[in-house]
Amino acid sequence: MSVGLRIAVLIKQVPTIEGGHATLELGPDGRLIREGLDLEINPFCRRAITKGVELAKDTGGECIAITLGPPSAEDALREALAAGVDRALLISDKKFIGSDTLATARALAGAITLHGPFDLVLTGLNSVDADTGQVGAQVAELLDVAFVSGVRQLELDGRQLELECERDDGLVHALVELPALLSVAERLTYPAKHTPEERAAVDPARITRISADELGEGPWGQEGSPTWVGEVRLIENSRLGTLLSGSLDEQLDALMEALRSRSALETGEPTPSETVPMTGGVATAVVVALEPGRERFGRELLGGAARLAHELDGSVYALVSGASPALIDLGGYGADRVIRLSAGERINAEDVADALVSIAAEINPSVLLAPSSSWGREVAARFCAATNSGLTGDASSLEVANGRLVAWKPAFGGQLEASITATSPIQCATVRAGALPLLAPRDHLPTESTRLVAVRGRVAYSDHRIDEAADKIAGASVLISIGAGVDAERYGEISPLVELLNAELIATRKVTDKGWLPRTRQVGITGLHVRPPLCIVIGAAGKFNHMVGVRAAGTVVGINIDEASPLFAVSDLGIVGDWAIVVPALTERIAKELTN
């Protein structure tokens, strides 16, 4: 066991949105009114605090909490101190107002350098208000240290960390030497939580204020932020909220008529209505970083890139590493040029980001797209920190306005949607799986070149256990969402409906916490966001934290025995009844409908 580790924990205050009760309003300027909002420590950051305190105590070291925010953010640091951190740093100055993720990362990296060195830096996997998950990787790039995301198990042996990490498609093991920066997942440990009385009892002398001048000339805040928030709009609940009445047979009659009129029972993946547009212009370049093994996601990104390039009179460059589709497929999906990264050993996200920096210097792209996955977020975040480029994380749609990329992204747990533009020459975005439509392939053969990559080798990944749920869920026309009200031992009673509709199961966080379904099937604020034509919710309460993940579904059907369940307000059609009785009857009705 190492002795005397110095650990920094990066934390953030966010609006309290548990249950969807945060009241979010927009001012005359279209910006969020923050005054009066209840604030708390980001849930993921609470796990980082617990683990940082634990490691510092075990090694006889020191744990310091750091946050960037207004003077009121001191309350978050008080809670961290109550949880056992030794000291706290509050980066607070009017010059920091308007900081985007990159400007925030610069300030945090500056404070870490000023009060360092540190052996280990911990932060949350992402923040539930913005869900970008990019600040940690940007800080790691600025500090030039190894970065590993989604840590759910951690063992320290001397100066080496053995980690198990959550990925979008499963789990992976990693070995990394200190110093390093880790983002932590929910399952790592219990959250640090303390009462207002415990926070008030903390000695304020244990909190050190850091000004902008102490960190250097900057630029800081809005001046140092390459992204700009434009139009912001509230996302209203657009569900019908129709609670069906009468006997079960009468409810099912009404349900089937409604599903028929909404074409919600057309099973099988829809045929794309749009073909990948022809590109190949010389005005600009749109680069897509393709994640190995995620072919469907890659198709979505390349199709979206081709749409942008078509409007911008540009060409699409596909950057690939590892196994990838054939050249003709890449061209059909949207690529005009393919750059294959080659090395004698495994190429990690950090190495891909390094290669992108040198490639961008040569081809001068205007847009970079990457998947909003663990891999893609690190690639894009590191690239943008290295090139001072603006990055929109977790974009849900892309468009062009006045020759510039506009990326729309959800925020505050999906209650808001904001348009983000970048002032930097290169505009970057990570995009959610399923956010962009899957386009029909065109007939096009791209050119190809190979680029040798220098491998840093700071993180050794192994034993990647892949669960193909994410891709299956993305391609499913029907999803059946399972809540904790359905015991795992009774899932077999739902299987006939699943098989009949060729559906995929998704789940609430409570279900995955119990281990009844894998985390790769969790939907909601801290899970997947899906957009099937039909989603049937069974045994769930309908809480905001889960239902926000199915916001883009075409039709939502809720089944609950409680007529007063919140589920019905966020469903289009609701059936009141015991799921164990309703589901077999519904299966029989749908079977008859599909055979007619």
Image: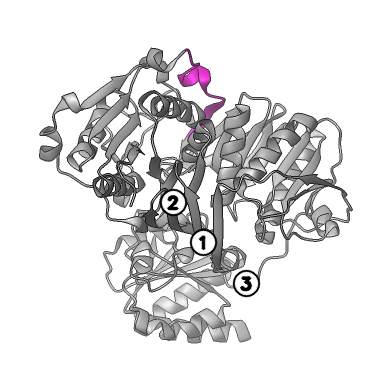
Disc 2 packing (10 Å; few <14; some 14–19; many ≥20)? some
Disc number lying in front (3 or 1) = 1
- Under circle 1, the secondary element is strand
What is the x, y in percent for residue 391?
A: 58, 34
At horizontal 46% and vertical 20% (from top left) the residue drawn is: 221
Residue 125 visible from this viewpoint: no
Q: Which residues are magenta?
A: 217-232
Whole-angstrom CA distance, mark 3 to mark 2, is 53 Å
Disc 1 packing (10 Å; few <14; some 14–19; many ≥20)? some
The total of numbered circles placed on residues is 3
What is the x, y in percent for residue 542?
A: 35, 61
Q: Nearer the viewer, residue 529 or 9?
A: 9
> Can you tell which quarter of the image residue 239 is in?
bottom left
Residue 492 colored in magenta in the image:
no
Give the side of residue 573 with respect to residue 66, left or right.
right
Q: Nearer the viewer, residue 588 or 78?
A: 78
Q: Amino acid at mark 2?
A: Gln
The residue pinned by badge 1 equals 172
Disc 3 packing (10 Å; few <14; some 14–19; many ≥20)? some
Residue 221 colored in magenta in the image:
yes
The residue pinned by badge 3 equals 266
At horizontal 39% and vertical 39% (from top left) the residue drawn is: 119
Q: Which mark is residue 160?
A: 2
Disc number lying in front (3 or 2) = 2
What is the x, y in percent for residue 420?
A: 56, 32
- Under circle 2, the secondary element is strand
Whole-angstrom CA distance, mark 3 to mark 1, is 37 Å
- Under circle 3, the secondary element is loop
The mark that comes first in sequence, 2 or 1, is 2
What is the x, y in percent for residue 169?
A: 55, 62
